[in-house]
Amino acid sequence: MQKYRADESTLQSDGAVVWSARWMGGLSLARINNCRWESLAGEPRITVYVTGEPDTFFSQPAVCSYKGRRVNGYITGDDSGLVFRHTYF
């Protein structure tokens, strides 16, 4: 599922590891390990992969695998850092 390479990592305050690809223009988000899934009860931790360019200023399309299923969604920010929210389409 990973589309972009992951060159550098940083640690968020909630324990998630944010991986970025180093390009000529700077760093681009590639994946997040141990990411919070905000829109699911219990907020499980998952690995989320970026699937494309940001579609708005506040979100970036992403995908994860949960219980053997591929789940589409987006990565956005909240008070504690970056989180994943799933979509129904």
Image: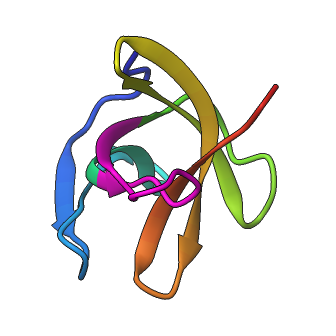
Q: Nearer the viewer, residue 38 or 59?
A: 38
Does the magenta-highlighted stretch encompass residue 74?
Answer: no
x, y percentage for residue 76?
Answer: 60, 62
Q: In the rendered image of this protein, does residue 50 appear above or below residue 8?
A: above
Q: In the rendered image of this protein, does residue 18 appear above or below residue 49?
A: below
Residue at image coords 34%, 20%: 67
Residue at image coords 34%, 43%: 21
Residue at image coords 44%, 50%: 29
Residue at image coords 25%, 38%: 6
* Quarter-of-image position of residue 7: top left
x, y percentage for residue 17?
Answer: 20, 58
In the picture, which quadrant includes the N terminus?
Answer: top left
Q: Residue furthest front?
A: 41
Instruction: Tell how many labels.
Output: 0
Q: Nearer the viewer, residue 13 or 25?
A: 13
Q: In the rendered image of this protein, does residue 88 appear above or below residue 10?
A: above
x, y percentage for residue 28?
Answer: 45, 50
Does the magenta-highlighted stretch encompass residue 41?
Answer: yes
User: Is any atom of residue 23 visible in this view?
Assistant: no
User: Is any atom of residue 44 visible in this view?
Assistant: yes
Q: Nearer the viewer, residue 17 or 45?
A: 45
Residue 72 placement, left or right of 34: right
In the picture, which quadrant includes the C terminus?
Answer: top right
Q: Which residues are magenta?
A: 35-48
Q: Nearer the viewer, residue 51 or 27?
A: 51
x, y percentage for residue 62?
Answer: 56, 36
Colouring rule applied to residues: rainbow
Residue 43 placement, left or right of 73: left
Residue 87 placement, left or right of 49: right
